[in-house]
Image (tube, helix red, strand yellow):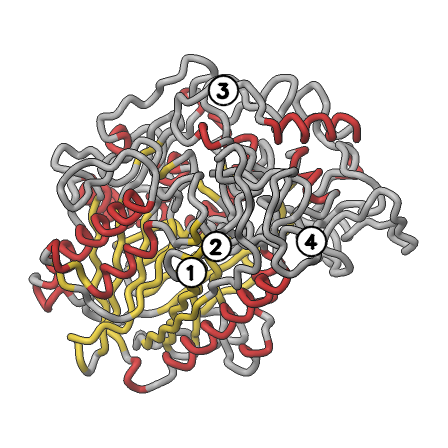
Amino acid sequence: MGALVGVRTAGQNARHSGPPNVMSSKQVLAFALATSLGAVRCSQPPTPPVDAMPVDSAADAGRDAREDDSAPDAGEQDTGADAGVDAAPFVVYPGVDDRCPGAAHCPMGSDGMLYVGVARALINPTIVESMWTDTNMNNLWESGETYVDTNGNGRFDATWIAGFSSGRPATSIHDDLEVRAMAFRSGDVTVAIVSLDIVGLFRDDMERIRQHPSLAGLDVDHVLISSTHLHEGVDTVGLWGESPFMTGVNATYQSLVIERAANAVRDAVRDAMRPEARALMRVAQVLTVDGMMDPRPYVSDTRDPTILDPTLTMVQFVRERDPMQTIGTWVNWAAHPEYTGSRNNQLTADYVHTLRDVIENGDMMSGVAGIGGTTVFVNGALGGQVGPGQAAPLDRMGMPVRNAGLLKAESCGRNVAVLGLQELRRVQGTANNGLVTGPMPITYRTAKMHARVLNRLYWLGFQFRVLSRQLTNFNRSVAPSMTNVPWVESRATYLQVGPVATITAPGELHPELWVGAQDMRWSFNLPRVTERDNPPDFMRAPPPPYLRDLMLANSGVRYAFVSGLTQDFLGYIVADWNYVLHPTNPYTQEASGDHYEETNSIGPDSQEHLFAPMMDLARMGAVLDGGAGDAGADASADASADGGG
């Protein structure tokens, strides 16, 4: 499902379900309202005038103002000298603004000795009201349906579930929603990763985590904040409230999430400071495919072109003084956590819950032992509807589970975890018990970037305060328009821990931007194109090296993956050679063919403004042009395609 505007109907989970060009009721409302505001043009978006474009020569380049989170109502006026413009002219991509080693706060850099700490906390909400008369049995609360007003305030104070349609109330908690953190320390470099069981989090709230008082004085160099992109958890973005134009964010819950995330980072960093936190690592990578190299028993891709990376990466950290004791496991796999489906009203972490549980505790019926510790899961390149659409995980009886539901989510999580544990056991049987030998330094480089938001539905979200995030280079006193285009600030980070490297994506990265379009192995013998209208323009697809190639070409890197929905939450990041908007109703209506994701992207600039900085960060350390890095990348690609590590 898309990251920012959840207007996909329940019937759009599978590729060919329903007419692709018929607007949902929510889209009709959005289109009518946008038209009345003059926000929608019947043409492709033109280039903004020169005075609305960023420049590269401001003294405070890249800085945005901090006065307000979003555009005000049309009647508000900004009386400041800047007439409401949020920032001075800025640089779209200023380049790296922090790195270790190299920055003043980490002058010594890493000494190669690795310390790892972990922590976790619950982020379950308090469900205040959950009972209503679901007259049409669609699992949604709609205006006019009666409800039990427990607190007598005349409102249905539901806990709104993010993902799919708005108006989906939570009735109970099936399994815990969690925040999990892992901290790495080496020399004077400390980096933390925190993963939250939520649909997403804007950069503004991520900064609130980083600036939280509980982290004061800990000397943490960098914090990566990631969302599992859960479609069965609480709305933390705003788009899934009781109606499309009422936020679903509960301020009390949002504060709890921020506080628990900050506290988890604090506890993980403190854990990494203990002498017994000295760690060794072993890494297992395996393709989640069956014996016929078909990924669909685990995951599928339901957008053309069929390209996906179903690699499961498990980085196990064990105590140096007791290698049989797991500190934690850093896990990456790409799939939308929506296997439970759109008709579910129970809060659940979907397959992520079972995946973590089996890795830690094992599965007796599968004959696989767990490895203990704390598992920190980070999603991957899941754009383009990589998820449950055509997937059919096998249940305990060996029967495929095709229909959405808790059984499908549980089966997926268990099977992926079992496959990973089996591969990890195989690695453990190799030389040195599969443990990485030699120094394990920590390095990172990170960069700020700005992205232009041309999606008119997002404009409405800003205007009506459904989306609350800071905008820049934008006059807040008037409505968004093509002469007053909102921009957002975001961030990407390259992180390397020993032989493992990850690059963060501030949204849902389409896999063809990760592995490229030319290597047919990433289609796994499945039809690449199924739609006749507006098919992918492969002639415009760039040649290698691709992002994955660049990552594997960095010195010392043997394993690489994308950390999706990390550092921000900015919708689908679509390849420009397959980006098509509806010719008359862009964003409110899908173009014919397979182009839902465009309606949930910032606009045609997503590759240039969000993906290009990722490529730049990866390229900085890559050895290319026939160097050792190219050979390493090719060897790793061959091993991955063969199902090896």
> Label 3 is placed on what type of residue?
Pro
* Residue bearing mark 1: 177
In primary-sequence order, the first of circles 4 and 2 is: 2
Q: Nearer the viewer, residue 231 or 600?
A: 231
**Mark sitting earlier along the chain (2/1):** 1
Give the farthest residue toward the bottom: 275
Q: Identify the secondary structure beneath mark 3.
A: loop
Is the residue under label 1 in contact with that under label 3 (CB below 8 Å)? no
Tell me the residue at 14%/63% (across/down): 369
- Are dots 3 and 4 in contact, CB under 8 Å? no
Observer-nearest of 292 and 542: 292
Foreground mark, 4 or 1? 1
Mark 1 Cα-neighbour bin, 10 Å: few <14, some 14–19, many ≥20: many
Mark 2 in CB contact with mark 3 (< 8 angstroms):
no
Residue 198 marker: 2
Residue type at tag 4 = Gln
In the picture, the disc for residue 20 is 3
In this rendering, does residue 95 appear at all?
no
Give me the C-alpha separation between circle 3 and circle 1.
Answer: 34 Å
**What is the number of the mark on residue 470?**
4
Q: Is residue 394 above or below residue 427?
A: above
Task: Pinpoint residue 149: horizontal percent, then vertical percent.
Answer: 63, 54
Task: Give the image location of residue 121, x and y in percent.
Answer: 43, 70
Residue 569 on image: x %, y %: 54, 49
User: Which residue appears at 22% of the width and 43% of the height?
Assistant: 288
Look at 46% across and 57% down and name the residue there: 226
Farthest residue in the top direction? 532
Residue type indicated by callout 1: Leu
Between discs 3 and 1, the one toward the N terminus: 3
